[in-house]
Image: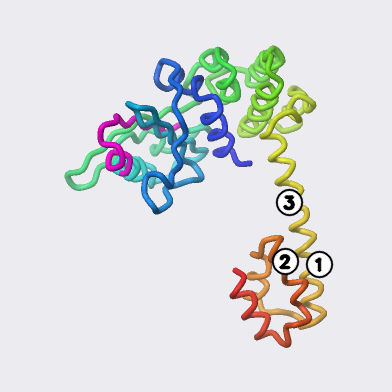
């Protein structure tokens, strides 16, 4: 699970905590699917879209600054206004890792006579105390302004232990561990945060499932590559690249179809049909 995905998980499952931070009050917003804005996709990997009767809140969590962020803010705002013109649109870009790039201070999209403003939060400039007041904000504390990140992580760990709900405790612990990886050594994180607590989390379970899937994918690719080499000899790079891009299910299908493929041309046709 990526850093952006973890932030999306937090925003969607601890909405009241996130809105307390960003809006100054707990607002129970509901998740808005990006596909609900228009038929074409809209930055689904990094977009968090929440709304209620009066407000559409758009949050972009970013590890690294990107030049196209201002345009993305404008693009989303136009789509949101077109969909529900009666609602106010609030947009926040949250940068997670310290950067000296001037892009992290850019709060305006300007082109010709079009000007659009949005809010930017550089999380390393936010006081750590702000993120230790609510469970859903704890994972961000170690990224915030602090003189001793290890000590902050230890403090957060103790607060996590006090969360009564087991599932919520595990989700906060696992999210904290992932985001702390941006600024702290992974061995240190494992020494501070209890793995048995994290195992109760859907975030942790997703990470394990992804790792297992990648392991099966690697094994499937290795087996398919050996069989292809045995049947067709050394394959050209473009064929190898297509094989490496296959999903686990497609690799299994290739194994079943392998001996029905008469030559490299038939293999190339099969790969074209299963990309």
- The image position of residue 264, as x and y in percent, is 69, 84
Disc sitting over residue 251 in the figure? 2
Residue 23 is a magenta residue: no
- The image position of residue 108, as x and y in percent, is 29, 36
Residue 71, quarter of the rendered image: top left
Placement of 110 over or under 160, stated as above or below:
below
Between the C-alphas of marks 3 and 2, the distance is 13 Å
Nearer to me, 198 or 86:
86
Give SS at disc 3: helix
Between the C-alphas of marks 3 and 1, the distance is 15 Å
Placement of 21 over or under 235, stated as above or below:
above
Q: Which residue is mark 3?
A: 213
Residue lying furthest front in this view? 53
Q: Which residue is mark 1?
A: 223
Residue 102, quarter of the rendered image: top left
Residue at screen point 26% across, 32% down: 86
């Amino acid at each position: 699970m990526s850093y952006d995905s973890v932030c999306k998980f937090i925003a969607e499952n601890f909405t009241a905590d996130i809105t307390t931070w960003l809006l100054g009050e707990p607002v129970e917003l509901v998740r808005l699917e990006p596909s609900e804005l228009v038929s074409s996709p809209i930055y689904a990997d990094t977009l968090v879209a929440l709304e209620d009767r009066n407000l559409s809140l758009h949050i972009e969590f970013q590890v690294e600054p990107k030049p196209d962020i201002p345009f993305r803010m404008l693009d989303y705002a136009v789509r949101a206004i077109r969909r529900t013109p009666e609602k106010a649109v609030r947009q926040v870009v949250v940068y997670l890792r310290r950067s000296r790039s001037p892009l992290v201070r850019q709060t305006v999209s300007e082109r010709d006579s079009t000007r659009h403003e949005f809010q930017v939060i550089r999380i390393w400039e936010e006081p750590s105390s702000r993120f230790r007041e609510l469970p859903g904000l704890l994972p961000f504390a170690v990224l915030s302004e602090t003189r001793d990140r290890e000590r902050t992580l230890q403090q957060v760990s103790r607060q996590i232990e006090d969360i009564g709900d087991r599932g919520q405790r595990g989700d906060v612990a696992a999210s904290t561990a992932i985001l702390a990886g941006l600024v702290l050594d992974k061995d240190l994180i494992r020494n501070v945060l209890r793995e048995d607590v994290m195992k109760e989390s859907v975030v942790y379970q997703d990470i394990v499932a992804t790792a297992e899937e990648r392991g099966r994918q690697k094994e499937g690719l290795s087996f398919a590559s050996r069989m292809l080499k045995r049947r067709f000899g050394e394959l050209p790079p473009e064929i190898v690249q297509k094989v490496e891009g296959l999903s686990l299910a497609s690799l299994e299908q290739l194994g079943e179809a392998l001996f029905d493929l008469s030559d490299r041309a038939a293999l190339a046709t099969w790969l074209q049909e299963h990309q």
